[in-house]
Amino acid sequence: MKIGIVCPYSWDVPGGVQFHIRDLAEHLIRLGHDVSVLAPADDGTPLPAYAVSAGRAVPVPYNGSVARLNFGFLSAARVRRWLHEGTFDVIHIHEPAAPSLGLIACWAAQGPIVATFHTSNPRSRAMIAAYPILQAALEKINARIAVSEYARRTLVEHLGGDAVVIPNGVDVGFFANAEPNPAWQGGTIGFIGRIDEPRKGLPVLIRAMPAILAALPGTRLVVAGRGDQAEAVAPLPEELRSRVEFLGMVSDEDKARLLRSVDLYVAPNTGGESFGIVLVEAMSAGAPVLASDLDAFAQVLDQGEAGELFANEDAEALAESAVRLLGDAERRAELSARGSAHVRRFDWSTVGADILAVYETVADGAASVATDERATGLRARLGLAARD
């Protein structure tokens, strides 16, 4: 099958959606499918052989964060050229409601179209206001996927229609078989995420550290992710700052090794999460997980059976739970075993098969994807201010 996948966010700025698309593409290629991914990318960004650049992206506030998106007349031309040259059996658009390549591809394409909705935002006034603009594009989608029940709910409430829930996938074996790093073992708490993005919750964890260290002075916090490290530890008393180790951006291999090494993985995210891929990665590696009680996190952790939950943004509750778990090896081993069993449903062998079943359903008996020559008013939809 010839499959085109559209990534809305810049390929050179790592994020959960980009990782999902990358891993999906590589899983499909291993199965023998012909896959092309269209994504925003700055000049000089190293791209895998299956990826095609749609040009540079610009930072835009979106879903409680700042996303690097690609939108404008030049982008539209590149989308149409990619569609024309691809002769795809199906295209898979991620986040078609975002002001980026996916929305343009919906406008520009005709034929079998699958869309995945990642966003969970129950109070998005912008999405409601944009619905009249989005409607013509969304009506062309043949099958909708949501990565969680909460992403599905956002879709239903804001855009109408429904979706089948297929979670993000993970190569469970990659994480389970990683070699622990002794440097990251022994009384360690792990955190992975962008340091300077408040909704990833590192400030909550930093506020909890004095209480954790008062009870367990030998504890270390190991942080992987980009951002201002000095600013991150500034709220801590100076004598405690050495108990936080920053690794910066890490490779996939080192991420897996970190998750295999830590005594406890903490996900203190404060909102805007539709799934929680890092929780699945941590469980795959056998790390006991402690996470904020966001709805999406509770679902991934089987309502607290596969990992423990604490009250969102409550640093005191986080500290109490972390101290208890770090002091209870038996409970951590129990969580590790439960997480390892629970996570199998997120392996690409299962998730990939479910996505392929959707592709086959919409492509069965249909003509290949082509540019929609009936689409009119594309320049007007893009708007005069949306120039590259």
Image: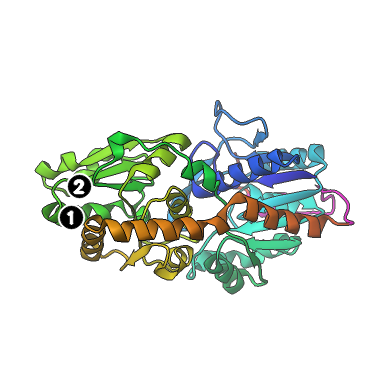
**Helix, strand or loop at mark 1:** helix
Magenta residues, as a range? 365-383
Label 2: few (<14), some or many (≥20) within 10 Å?
A: many
- Residue toward you, 345 or 132: 345
Percent x, y for residue 268?
A: 33, 57
- Residue toward you, 272 or 183: 183
Percent x, y for residue 42?
A: 54, 32
State which quadrant residue 293 falls in: bottom left
Q: Main secondary structure of the magenta part?
A: loop
Apparent side of residue 371 relative to residue 353 in the rendered image (left or right): right
- Residue toward you, 259 or 177: 177
State which quadrant residue 159 falls in: bottom right
Looking at marks 1 and 2 on the same chain, the residue that comes earlier in the sequence is marked by 1
Residue on which disc 1 sits? 212
- Tell me the tag on residue 219: 2
State which quadrant residue 313 falls in: bottom left
**Distance of mark 1 from mark 2, alpha carbons?**
8 Å
- Residue toward you, 347 or 199: 347
Percent x, y for residue 379?
A: 70, 49
Task: Give the total number of marks visible in the rendering.
Answer: 2
Q: Are marks 1 and 2 in contact (CB under 8 Å)?
A: yes
Of the 4 image quadrants, the one containing the C terminus is: top right
Apparent side of residue 279 relative to residue 309 in the rendered image (left or right): right
Apparent side of residue 149 relative to residue 283 in the rendered image (left or right): right
Residue type at numbered disc 1: Ile
Residue drawn 18% across the image and 55% down it: 212
